[in-house]
Image: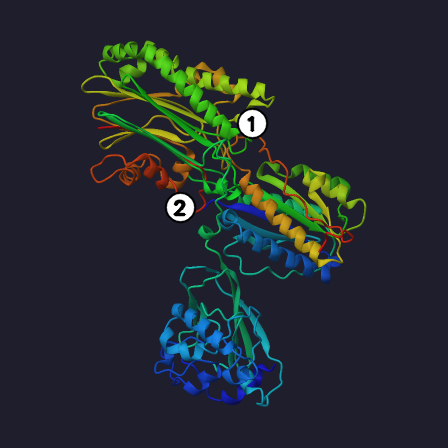
Amino acid sequence: MRRAPVYLLIDTSGSMAGESIIAVQNGIKTCIDTLRSDPESLEKAHVSIVTFSDTASVAMPLTSVQEIPTVPDFTIHGCTSYVAALDKLNELLEQDIVPNRGEEKGDYKAFVMIFTDGMPTDKESELQEAINRLNRKKITYFVAGTTSSDERVIPTLSKITGKNEYVIFLSSADPRSFQRFFQWVSQSASRSIGVQGDHRPGDDIPLGELPPLPNFNPDDELFL
Amino acid sequence: MNKESDLSSCTDSCFPSGEGGSCPAPTQDMESVNVPENESPSIEPVMPKDENPETKAEGEGNRDWEDGKKSGEENISIENGSSSTEMNNEVPQETDEVPLATDPGSQTDIPITSVEKSREEIPIANAKCGTEYLFDVDAFIRQECLISVTYSDNQGDLLFYPEEMVVKGIPLTSRDWWVEVELPDRICKFFCYVNADPRTLWKDIPSDQKVKTDKDYKAILSPQVDMVGVSYRGRSHANKGTYRDDDFYIHSMDGIFFSVVADGAGSAELSSTGSKVFCQSAGQEFVRLLIERKKRILDMLQEAQFNLTACRQHHSLIKCLYEILPAAAYHGCKQLEKLAADSQMPLKKYNTTALLTFSMQASEMWWFCASFQVGDGITVAIADDNLYALGSPDGGAFPGETLFVTSDSIFGNVAELVNRIKIYLCPVKPIIISMTDGITDSYFKDKSLADLQIWKQLISEICNEKGNLLPAAEICEWLDYYTVQEHDDKTMTIIKYK
């Protein structure tokens, strides 16, 4: 079984309590359902959900989208440690993703999304070290979503994702923006499978652009 | 609405749990959960419902007729359909709304209890459209009174069978599905997702056929040899309307049979053109170079007394092949370089793999074949029960990782190029097959490319009962076979001596 892993890192710190976490949970359901509507993703995509606050833990281990029963409930508490999230991700990339072995087919590289509503509570230097430790060889796209209006959050997340345009600001007041964001996440995850066509070992995969972002501006007339 | 409204008729509605349950099947109580009266209630499922004929008849005009007709049609797929038709006339079909656990027919009943029941949400294995589903819920509820059963929808394709304590059926549409089983003390909600059958989700969006056709086939038939080339666009390209990246070239001249197979890199934007231009230019050069050297090759094979080891050590023979195979591939790359320069694109946008193969009869007793490969895919020669690989696929640690003939490093190392030339001498008439990874990955899956039986199976599928190759168009259509997870372009050339 050749798996295309999708890691969703979800902030479950105290401030996510209430509507935010429900919107995220619904969003993840949308994301999984959208993956199930694409034939290639339906056959290949495997989703893992990691929650992080003071520490990080696996809320759902890597599971085929065909087999996922339901989005797990999240326990909300504590602070926001990006370091815990990234280290857990690294551990899972190492543990989950099996490369090709002889004629035995290995897994695809992973698509990763991190969702947070605030600045990390880690020390800056420790966060930088965790970013440096990240095994990007096993990752195609890394995208982020945040509801934080703290102007430091987007630059901080950009350091993690490696690309500015993959950090999306969402309005926490509007559940529809969550739906759209998570739909985009799943389309991007499907693309991550599609772009892993023939390439030279060790070469960066020419990723190209992700699908166009949905419109998140509630003032725009096009926003329905 | 009150779920407890059915309680009035439930005082002794125990169900046997399937194996050795002692309670009699209570027809009357079954009715309260809308199980039809039937001489064999023990195999009846609890059908979805949310209305009964009395309530619906009030002011609903001709809807009854429509409902009856629709449910009658749908009933065909339901087990014991004939015996449950009567009941199914009650099932309204036009609403997708999730029905609440209600029985309007007993609205007038006074609830016996108003104590809030505990709810258990129990995930059961996901189902798949068109595939038989069976899940045993015995572990969660057994030997219990059953008060009401409510479904997420009234499609009736997945049902709860209280006698067997299973959920079963053949689901028809992809959706979230659940059944709520109300017991005296609690409500158990079993839920799952019904996945679509991936086969039904693929789109077939044509690409611009002037740039490249979505499929291609060619045959060269002669008294001694049948030769076929076939190429079919993979589903992942068809689903997005993108081009077939694979290509091939076949030719025969002066008793020599040539084939070139190329797989344009999925990661390179112009690789469908890359493989096409490569096949044509390398193929034509291949013919030119080989025709000039045919006699020398035959002489040297004779010098080596058709001994394979001696041939491999025959320096002049290898040098001669080096001047043909890698040289033709190099020529193909030069053409691509030129194309890239003209269109001001980097060469890597045209990246492609390459498999160049030729064969000829070397004497009355011997058939010679040689191949040169860069990238994935494979060429094999099969003669009787001998399978010989004329090369090995270049791969990496992750899916899709391979080498390209267009990469800078390929033509820089003579020793490596020589290593990529493989020769074989067959004492009987062989069949020589070259194919891209679209076929090796899908047809062999995790099995070894050295498995002769799989090759024999493949050959039997592309030949008729007399052992002759099927027409090229038929072999091309055959390439559309379905393998889960493997939807790349598929291309193959076959040289079959008769």
Q: Is mark 1 on a helix, strand or loop?
A: helix
- Where does the image place residue A59, in percent across and percent down from the top left? 60, 56
Residue at (67%, 57%) from the top-left corner? A24
Q: Earlier in the sequence, mark 2 or mark 1?
A: 1
Name the quadrant containing residue B486: top left
Image quadrant containing the N terminus of chain B? bottom right
Image quadrant containing the C terminus of chain B? top left
- Residue sitting nearer the eye, B409 or B313: B409
Label 2 crowding class (10 Å Cα cut-off): few <14, some 14-19, many 20+? few
Q: How many labels does the image show?
A: 2
Q: Residue A153 carries which label?
A: none
Asked if residue B446 can be seen in this view, the reply is no
CA distance separating discs 2 and 1? 29 Å
Mark 2 residue type: Tyr
Residue at (59%, 79%) from the top-left corner? B117
Mark 1 residue type: Lys
Determine the chain carrying the residue at label 2: B
Q: From this viewpoint, which residue is outermost toward the front? A: B62
For disc 1, the marked residue is B349
Label 1 crowding class (10 Å Cα cut-off): few <14, some 14-19, many 20+? many
In the image, residue B284 sits, relative to residue B8, either above or below, namely above
- Where does the image place residue B89, in percent across and percent down from the top left? 45, 77
In the image, residue B419 sits, relative to residue B76, either above or below, namely above
- Where does the image place residue B461, in percent across and percent down from the top left? 29, 41
- Where does the image place residue B457, in percent across and percent down from the top left? 28, 40
Q: What element carries label 2?
A: loop
Determine the chain carrying the residue at label 1: B
Asked if residue A34 can be seen in this view, the reply is yes
Residue at (45%, 54%) from the top-left corner? B197
- Residue sitting nearer the eye, B393 or B331: B331
Q: Residue B482 carries which label?
A: 2
Q: For this view, does B339 lie left or right of residue B299?
A: right
